[in-house]
């Protein structure tokens, strides 16, 4: 796959900083947990520090120790609004591991540029390649309706216990309402994933589709009991056998991303392809091209 971002650095540690910034440009909704999964601690065992990335306000990032980048223009801004520091100390072996790992995210490294004279600190810059355009961070959707639902639920439970003795059936109602909330959320994520679309005849995930799958992974982490069957469908156009294989590949691409980048256990996911065998509207091929996220009971 062609590279999307090239990092130009003036020192090993500045280039490592540039790689982290490039990742955040490509995945602006990422959190510290996502960043640590993308570039795990074992990439840099030479430094003697426990974490490659820490919150900028944590102990060890202030003036008492100079082991992390902490200038304002060096900090990484996470999707949740928090700021993160990356470790400064990169030996040649650990830096080479970082460079090799960056290729997994279509980030390549240019040769070091000459450092500025006059004692100025080295820096980095990013270049976008092959027509790549960085995504615009999505605005967080308002979840007022969830809070309203929970408020009504809590109020109902409080009123019930105030008037009557607790009954098991009411606990079951609470569980059922919570289930409705995450079922609705997964249905919303499914719609967003289908809006991102696959290129015709291909199974590669678009950047928008990857962002949606990050949201799905977070929802599954909140509800570890949830298992999903991801089902790919195609329109009836073209060869039936080709459509069947394409639907299977698209479903598997989503599963592989959730496992590899979302940290979801593979046994909680199943990829299924149904080709063009289950159309929703035979007169509308666009509607029939879809991926379904089915909760397995």
Image (cartoon, rainbow, N blue to C red):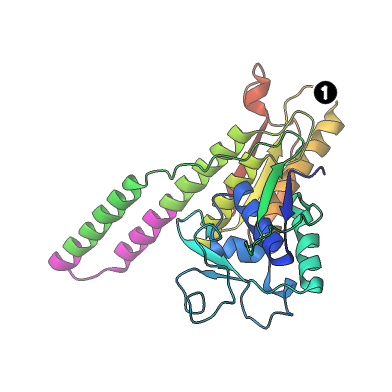
Depth check, front residue: 252 or 133: 133
Who is closer to the viewer here, 46 or 154?
46
Q: In this picture, is 170 found above or below 183? A: below
**Percent of width and height locating residue 267:** 69, 63
Q: Give the dominant element type of the magenta stretch: helix, strand or loop.
A: helix
x and y percentages locating residue 143 in the rendered image: 37, 47
Q: Which residues are magenta?
A: 160-180
Q: Whole-percent x and y of residue 261? A: 67, 57
Quadrant housing residue 159: bottom left
Q: Is residue 264 magenta?
A: no
Comparing 117 with 156, the one in front is: 117
Q: Read off the residue under disc 1.
A: 238
Q: Is residue 173 magenta?
A: yes
In the picture, measured across the screen, residue 264 lies left or right of residue 147, that is right
* Local secondary structure at mark 1: loop
Seen from this angle, which residue lies furthest top?
283
Picture quadrant of residue 16: bottom right
Residue 98 higher or lower than 63, as above or below: above
The quadrant of the rendering that contains the N terminus is: top right
Residue 101 vs 280, above or below: the answer is below
Q: Residue at x 72, y 51 (%)?
A: 7
Can residue 141 be seen here?
yes
- Residue toward you, 290 or 58: 58
């Amino acid at each position: 796959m062609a590279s999307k971002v090239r990092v130009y650095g003036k020192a090993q540690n500045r280039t490592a900083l540039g790689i982290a910034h490039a990742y955040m440009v490509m995945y602006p909704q990422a959190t510290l947990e996502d960043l640590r999964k993308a570039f795990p601690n074992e990439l840099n065992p030479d430094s003697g520090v426990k974490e490659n990335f820490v919150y900028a306000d944590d102990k060890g990032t202030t003036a008492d120790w100079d082991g992390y980048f902490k200038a304002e223009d060096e900090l990484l801004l996470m999707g949740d609004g928090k700021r993160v520091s990356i470790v400064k100390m990169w030996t040649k072996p650990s830096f080479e591991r970082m460079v090799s790992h960056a290729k997994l995210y279509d980030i390549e490294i240019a040769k070091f540029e000459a450092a500025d004279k006059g004692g100025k600190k080295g820096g980095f810059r990013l270049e976008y390649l092959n027509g790549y355009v960085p995504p615009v961070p999505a605005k967080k959707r308002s979840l007022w309706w969830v809070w309203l639902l929970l408020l009504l639920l809590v109020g109902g439970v409080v009123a019930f216990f105030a008037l009557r003795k607790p009954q098991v059936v009411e606990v079951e109602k609470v569980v059922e309402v919570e289930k409705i909330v995450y079922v609705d959320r997964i249905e919303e994520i499914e719609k967003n994933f289908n809006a991102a679309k696959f290129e015709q005849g291909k199974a590669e995930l678009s950047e928008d589709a990857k962002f949606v799958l990050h949201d799905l992974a977070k929802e599954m982490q909140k509800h570890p009991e949830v298992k999903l069957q991801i089902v790919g469908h195609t329109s009836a156009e073209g060869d039936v056998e080709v459509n069947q294989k394409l639907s299977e590949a698209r479903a598997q691409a989503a599963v592989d991303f959730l496992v590899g980048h979302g940290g979801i256990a593979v046994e909680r996911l199943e990829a299924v392809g149904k080709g063009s065998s289950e159309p929703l509207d035979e007169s509308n091929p666009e509607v029939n091209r879809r991926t379904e996220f089915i909760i397995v009971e």
